[in-house]
Image (cartoon, grey):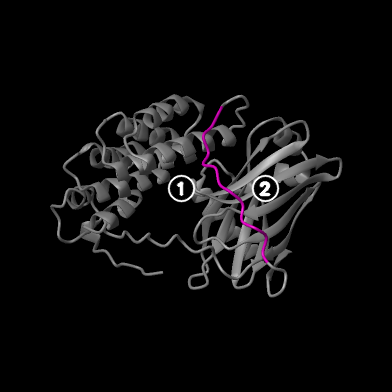
Amino acid sequence: MVRVQIAEQDIRPEVVRDALTGRSERLSASLALAMVQDLDLDEPQQRGIVHETLQNRSVEPQVRRLAIQALMKLKAESAVAELAGVLEQGRLEEEVASDAVTVLGRIGGPHELELLERVSGSAVTELLRARADFARALIVHRFGLAGKEVNLPSAESQPPPEAVGALAFISRQPGHDRGSRALQSVHEVFPDMNPRDLEVYEVQCGPVLMAVVVSRKVVSGEGMPKAVEGPTLPAVVAVRSEETGRYLPALVALSRPIDQDRISLVLLRLTGEPVFLGEGSARPDGITFELTSAKIPGVAPIAARVHVTDGALEITGISGHGALPGRSPETMTAPKT
């Protein structure tokens, strides 16, 4: 981690405001936004600085995108109100609007579903429409809103990997330090996921170490009936960086009932692209999911089983070495004249 030394005279609201509007050579906009919480200001005043940045259309889109990320450090009610204000502006740059709906899906509630539906319906690009639909899906699953239709991208499954030479999934309990870091990383992305209500299970696959952060209610058996009754967000998967040791949330698990005792499970990137697909069966001894990889570039084939019992979660299976390659550009042949 790189630490930047900042002169004491620069840790002032007026200097930060100048940096955010490009009028300061001493501070970059990204550094100024990171400093907002360090200013001797109360939360409404900190919100005011971020608000000014978001509402000022002359500020570079990249700076306004950073301001959207800075909202995650404010109280959820304040951040949601600011995001709604941004999306109501109209004629937003695609990247600004996409970031706003992405964060809204992580911290917003049922009241924001209508706004996200309007954004999706009026979107002029497929990217913004997909991000708004995924934000709606996140809220529906976070709050267990049965009866709400969501639009998740469909994907075909890859064939399972060959067993010979495959990498095995190895499940284990993490140490206290790694578990705490994984919990904190998930809480930063999904602030309403309280670390006290979560359990961490590690899965090693080759050099990749993943932390599966699961609701304690799920592994205690209390949350199993909810999985059969309606949509849930049972887990977030964070990947440990070999270089820094930090955990980076990479996948979110969304489940929905298919029929009386069958449940669908899809693990998606935090931007909404499906990565792993599966179904589960609810039995008296727990729920067992069979997972395969989605047929998308960059994803290796897997054949995995997730078994959730009263008090434990176990992940077994294998992964192939090679990821599915991207499509090669087609060669256009000019017609003969």
Tell me the amino acid under the disc marked 1: Thr
Q: Which residue is mark 1?
A: 271
The spot of residue 110 in percent (x, y) is 51, 27
* Distance of label 1 from label 2 (alpha carbons): 19 Å
Q: What residue is rendered at 71% in x and 30% in y?
A: 229
Can you say which quadrant of the picture contains the N terminus?
Answer: bottom left
Q: What residue is rendered at 59% in x and 68% in y?
A: 208
Residue farthest toward the front in the current orientation of the protein? 337
Q: Is residue 96 above or below residue 113?
A: below
Q: Dot 2 surroundings within 10 Å: few (below 14), some, or many (20 or more)?
A: many
Please give the range of residues in magenta. Answer: 149-161
Task: Check residue 150 for magenta coloring.
Answer: yes
SS for dot 2: strand
159 or 120, which lies in front? 159
SS for dot 1: loop
Residue farthest toward the left in the current orientation of the protein? 23
Q: Is residue 175 visible?
A: no
37 or 153, which lies in front? 153
The spot of residue 112 in percent (x, y) is 45, 28
Tell me if 251 is positioned left or right of 127 in this view: right
Q: Is residue 150 above or below residue 214?
A: above
Tell me the amino acid under the disc marked 2: Gly
Q: Earlier in the sequence, mark 1 or mark 2?
A: 1
Q: Which residue is mark 2?
A: 278
Magenta span: predominant SS is: loop
Tell me if 102 is positioned left or right of 226 in this view: left
